Image: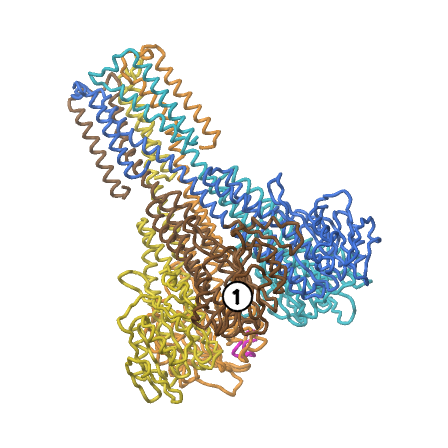
Chain colours: A brown, B yellow, C orange, D blue, E cyan
Amino acid sequence: MANTTKGRTRKTGLPPGTLIHTGQRRMETPRITVIEYSKDTFRETEIKDVKECPILRDTPAVAWINVAGLHDVDLLRQIGDAFGIHRLVLEDILATDQRPKMEDYQSYLYTVFKMLSYDEEKRGVAAEQVSLILGPNFVISFQEREEKIFEPVRETIKLDKGVIRRSGPDYLVYALLDVVVDHYFLVLEKMGEAVDVLSDAVLIRPEPAVLRELHQLRRELLFLHRAIWPLREVIAGLSRRNTELVREGTAIYLRDVYDHTVQMMDTVDIYREMMAGAMDIYLSSVSNRLNQVMKVLTVIATIFIPLTFLAGVYGMNFKTFPELEWRWSYPAFWLVCVIVTVVMVVYFKRKKWT
Amino acid sequence: MANTTKGRTRKTGLPPGTLIHTGQRRMETPRITVIEYSKDTFRETEIKDVKECPILRDTPAVAWINVAGLHDVDLLRQIGDAFGIHRLVLEDILATDQRPKMEDYQSYLYTVFKMLSYDEEKRGVAAEQVSLILGPNFVISFQEREEKIFEPVRETIKLDKGVIRRSGPDYLVYALLDVVVDHYFLVLEKMGEAVDVLSDAVLIRPEPAVLRELHQLRRELLFLHRAIWPLREVIAGLSRRNTELVREGTAIYLRDVYDHTVQMMDTVDIYREMMAGAMDIYLSSVSNRLNQVMKVLTVIATIFIPLTFLAGVYGMNFKTFPELEWRWSYPAFWLVCVIVTVVMVVYFKRKKWT
Amino acid sequence: MANTTKGRTRKTGLPPGTLIHTGQRRMETPRITVIEYSKDTFRETEIKDVKECPILRDTPAVAWINVAGLHDVDLLRQIGDAFGIHRLVLEDILATDQRPKMEDYQSYLYTVFKMLSYDEEKRGVAAEQVSLILGPNFVISFQEREEKIFEPVRETIKLDKGVIRRSGPDYLVYALLDVVVDHYFLVLEKMGEAVDVLSDAVLIRPEPAVLRELHQLRRELLFLHRAIWPLREVIAGLSRRNTELVREGTAIYLRDVYDHTVQMMDTVDIYREMMAGAMDIYLSSVSNRLNQVMKVLTVIATIFIPLTFLAGVYGMNFKTFPELEWRWSYPAFWLVCVIVTVVMVVYFKRKKWT
Amino acid sequence: MANTTKGRTRKTGLPPGTLIHTGQRRMETPRITVIEYSKDTFRETEIKDVKECPILRDTPAVAWINVAGLHDVDLLRQIGDAFGIHRLVLEDILATDQRPKMEDYQSYLYTVFKMLSYDEEKRGVAAEQVSLILGPNFVISFQEREEKIFEPVRETIKLDKGVIRRSGPDYLVYALLDVVVDHYFLVLEKMGEAVDVLSDAVLIRPEPAVLRELHQLRRELLFLHRAIWPLREVIAGLSRRNTELVREGTAIYLRDVYDHTVQMMDTVDIYREMMAGAMDIYLSSVSNRLNQVMKVLTVIATIFIPLTFLAGVYGMNFKTFPELEWRWSYPAFWLVCVIVTVVMVVYFKRKKWT
Amino acid sequence: MANTTKGRTRKTGLPPGTLIHTGQRRMETPRITVIEYSKDTFRETEIKDVKECPILRDTPAVAWINVAGLHDVDLLRQIGDAFGIHRLVLEDILATDQRPKMEDYQSYLYTVFKMLSYDEEKRGVAAEQVSLILGPNFVISFQEREEKIFEPVRETIKLDKGVIRRSGPDYLVYALLDVVVDHYFLVLEKMGEAVDVLSDAVLIRPEPAVLRELHQLRRELLFLHRAIWPLREVIAGLSRRNTELVREGTAIYLRDVYDHTVQMMDTVDIYREMMAGAMDIYLSSVSNRLNQVMKVLTVIATIFIPLTFLAGVYGMNFKTFPELEWRWSYPAFWLVCVIVTVVMVVYFKRKKWT
């Protein structure tokens, strides 16, 4: 996840603007869906050729073209030509290791960000790149593979829920961003659960495995932090409305998504601090365990060492050794042993060593 | 407390602006209290239906509408319609995990922040969301449940103390903010007590339980930090007076509350540094304890190991063993033991090991 | 020192602007001294009633009114009424836990900061709040109790040293600030001595008591940092001359005091880094000591354990035991012991363990 | 790598602007290559004397003069005179320890940065200084030695790929920067591999050698951070287009390279955090190992110490010693030994010490 | 070095602007050298009385007055009167603990900074304060004692090297700053050597002495950081040319010195990070050593403890003790010993404990 430079090196030495897909091929054939809608109309078509794609300069309708699958470089070039998109934008869409950013090309806005989801199997965060192009009356979205994530937006348009059918393409961009940010919250919640589990684990079983999980989680939180931070800037950039492509009414909605990202940053930061604290507790628990072990050794050794010495004394073979002859020597020896032991145990108890 | 994303996920996939209460239901029925006042008049009523609610466009009076309990979504929608409040604001009022913020909708200002109280039972900070809408001649406050916290403000108005009856709704907002910030100080004082207790505890009984409490406190201080920081921005935003809704006289008062928040930040930061220091002392105390134990082991073992060897020597069964025959061997043995012990104890004393 | 919220909670629930003295009562009766001076004149009087206080609108003279003792709330109110001072300013003067700040009320400037002194008995920094009000031709200073700190300024005025008699009240404010900042340097020097003492102590006697002193000092440095930082802002604010109350000539002098505060910040930061380093050395010294102890145990145990085993062997009672019969067995045993010991000591020496 | 002041001291005491080559001599003779190109023409020549160098004020062609090898100070001075370059710029070109920067001298822009490559043999990052001078229709590039790195750009021009032949010298600067930044990604990838290797190594073999490698890598990441940070500023400065030398179309391309540097910064920061985490794991692994060793000692010592005492007891030579006479004493002794051992092992198992 | 408040307290309570030399007296008598130069002329004189000092309002010549030795307060006052210098500037020149700063007094610029040199004997950085006053056609430099550091500048003027004779006094200020900054590089190089030495020392001999040196070096790097940071601001301030006293041509040169300071900051920061890393390695090395020692103890103890028990067993005096009678008991005993030892050594080897 952290090694974000893998695909990048494939491009070294090529002239700038060369279109190369640097991600993994995740779909068989790209799929292009076109949804046209206005206040009263709704039409959904799947097209094979970009030439079929409507460019509706003068109608009040909005067209949402969704491209799922990025490995067909020719297709991308056709779309770029049809909609007059800069070569560098196409290059960025194909390079799936982009940092979230928003770029204003006057006649259209280009936005790229990560869509996150929690992979239950690998128990990690999966990231996928989504690019959005906002034109005067169209939105083109590029996904690495077909995801169900934009389905609710499609439904909202189809069923004419909310204000989306009466709003422009900028509102559609907002709706898509909103649904993506909502998914971030799902990932964050999974993280929150892992944080809770590990906070307990460091106390109950301070083992190297827990330490590894802890570091894994910290790395994912760091990754999340890095993903949200520029996303925040992207949304802030959109809502600042330096462009005519974003209307004032939509800017208020975008500010709302912006607030969500700020809130997520806060949560991620709290999680990170909690995990830093858990690290401390882990280390403390480990050394606490060792202390317990060492104390037992100390107590047993400290009690028996003098006694063993005493037994050794009376095992000596001196010819002249008065105590050996005495009658009560042996019971006296045991008495001394018991007294020494009791004195030491009391001493240790008082010092709270056991 | 930290897991601020819990309720949020319930909303994933819904069209934006959908009103859903994401907090816990804390009251049976919402309660709406309306207090109308001007320089000479004071009237307090409890209403069931929003339609009864006075909208006093041209009178000099100020209306304070307090809504306690947020789970009745219909009620919220009616209030929104009656006062022309944006759907996103209503959504934010219902989502009880908002970050403190202030939004200017020209005809009214929307402010949301946390009201903190110290829960004696759970020994932790309890947070509740309060939303304020400041209109030209009204203030609407939304609480999650009915709290006595705004009671002093009600009293001040009723008994005509201070300048509140002669001031506009902006002063009422100030008064409400002031009383909330005063409660922050109460929470902070509780924290201060806990800080003092733990600062001593890490020295007296460096146990894992203390470490856990310490981390708990650090987390709460972090939470407090996170709550005050944006609150500060909110109040700064109000006092900057970019809007006509806040008069100049009130801005001076708001600046005063702003100073309080800055001061609280300072105190929280000092507490956090103190707890970081306490952490160091804790770890140091723990390892100091182990050192004590280890030193006792070392001293006892180091004294007895050579003596035991000596006793072992004279327990050997060699046929030719001159010392065993000597008369004073046994007393001489004890003499050697005493001398070795004394020499070692003196050595240890000089090295300051005991 | 750190618990700055103590008095604050007494005010919760009271209407804003209520005058309450939140500090400790430090004097019997407040004492008001009035010093009037111009280029040629100097008059010093002590007044009991504020009504006696001269308000000299049109004369070229400057009046310096010093109020020592703050617990008489009525007196404050009278002064406030006489000079037209805002209620919030009076409230801030009485609340002795203010953060240093400067507020511009057009007709006068309000400045509040801490006066620090080193308490030799308690071996800690003592802080006292000083408020200054700079009017067009007067300065009112409020102290918690009568301190000799402003005496040099009084002397300078009385003996007509420097340019103070030919300057306005803004220069008087500068002179008072300068004398306060000079006292900060005294406190800083005491801190510097403590820093030096502790830097040595952590090496010579790494004991828990030293650790506690170290943490105490770090806390005080943090406190100092917190006190100087906003003071710097205050003086910067004054010297920026957004107000007519501060003349250009005085601004140059204020910039000089500003430089002093920057320099103090630097020194405090260096002290803090040094104490952080001392902490490291302390921990390192402690573990070094334990290492020394452990090594002695190791060396002694490692030498004697094999020897004791050998002695044990020849203490066995086997019937068939050839060595026991040999003549030189006993001297040979000692020879083996000496050889083993020498070999081990050489080994340890080479490994640099002793 | 870190000791960036080595050559610098050679210059102390010389008047400013004195030309001295402070780097290592890396080539025999400097080599000057001139590539002239326009939309339709391409000419490549190698020159010995700067006077041969074309200065094409009025033709539409672009000249790219590449100077490889910097130790010939006279040559530099001639170039400086021919193109009217400031003495300080020449000084900077020769001082090969420059921090990346961009300077606008109105008639030309001066840019200096590091070209990085990964030295497989030394297993470290090798840095070389590249200076670029962008004039109205020429670009002069200075390299410490002849590197193949600019070869792809030469190819692109020669084969008329992309838009480079139809663009101005600013696009050539972009192309050169782009190829350099692409090489940074290669270095970053090597770093990423080392990060992965070390992340595993700290777990598998926590040895001092790994610690040293870890610190080495952290230092290189720090170096990389320091190299990229100002490079970012340089490219941002170029793309802000405060000068007429950079056209608008090229600024878009430069923004793209800027994005790459931001992304690299992110990756470097993630690597640095990962290595900080690896450090923690290393320390934790080391102490974990010691714990394992200590526990074995504890268990064996704790079991045998009481048993040895018992054996010592029955080795005593008391005359009156009833047990010695008993018939089953010896088997009973072994029975006791077995029971004690079993009890202890069970106790340790339950405490999870083994 | 760190205790920068020492001399300062001597001034507490004095009226502002009182001239007191707070540094150590470092020379017998102050020495004033005047160098006048223009494009064609050069004259060097040593004067005793300030009245001899030329003030050349209308000639094209530049006068450089160098004052070495600061303890003669009267002399300073005379210079101040002769050149119309503000009392606060004179005060700052005398107070040798100034933070580097630049102040614009319209008719002249005042600059103060530290000149650093490495004291080979004390093995530490020695700092001396240098003040510069830049007037329309003169530069006055104040040094604490006569240093050879400005000698190269004198030479450059005398021998008419570079452009200095054709430039104004602002270029002279640049030349002086340049030579001072060059000396910083010398100090930095010494630091770099110390950094290298210590980086090795922490690995080879992790002793408390090394730790102390390490902390000493970190403190000096911190001091250097603190000295360069404001110097950078000073030079940036000069090169921003808000004043007519600095010409545009000189600003370019100043920007060059500015770049040097930025580069020095980078190097200092890298050294600081390296020393932080060395600290980690030191601590790790120390604990590694202890681990080695502990492991030897563990291995020897673990091998011999069971063997000693066995020898103890056969030293028991039970009447009925079959093994004692057997013929091969004794060799069998040794066999068992060897087997136990071999098994344990193999076990330890496999666990990689030795």
Q: Residue furthest right?
A: D51
Q: Which is more toward the observer, C31 or D157? A: D157
- Is residue A133 visible to us here? yes
D181 versus E79 height, above or below: above
Q: Chain of mark 1?
A: A
Q: Is residue C164 magenta?
A: yes
Return the residue nearer the eye: C122 or B193: B193
Q: Is residue E82 left or right of residue A220?
A: right
Q: Is residue D301 above or below residue D222?
A: above
| Identity, as a three-letter code, of the amino acid under mark 1 | Trp
Image quarter hosting the C terminus of chain C: top left
C37 horizontally vs B132: left or right: right
Residue bearing the label numbered 1: A64
Residue A145, how many percent across, how many down? 50, 55
Q: Is residue B155 visible?
A: no
What SS does tag 1 mark? strand
Whether C203 is among the magenta residues is no
Q: What span is in magenta?
A: C161-170
- Which quarter of the figure has residue A305? top left
Taking the image as shown, residue D307 lies to the left or right of residue E241, namely left
Percent x, y of residue C23:
35, 70
**Vertical relation: B19 (above or below) D199:** below
Tell me which corner region of the image, top left, top right, bottom left or bottom right, holds residue D308.
Answer: top left
**Considering depth in this image, is E22 or B315 the residue closer to the camera?**
B315
Question: Front-most of B183 and A86?
Answer: A86
Quarter occupied by the N terminus of chain C? bottom left
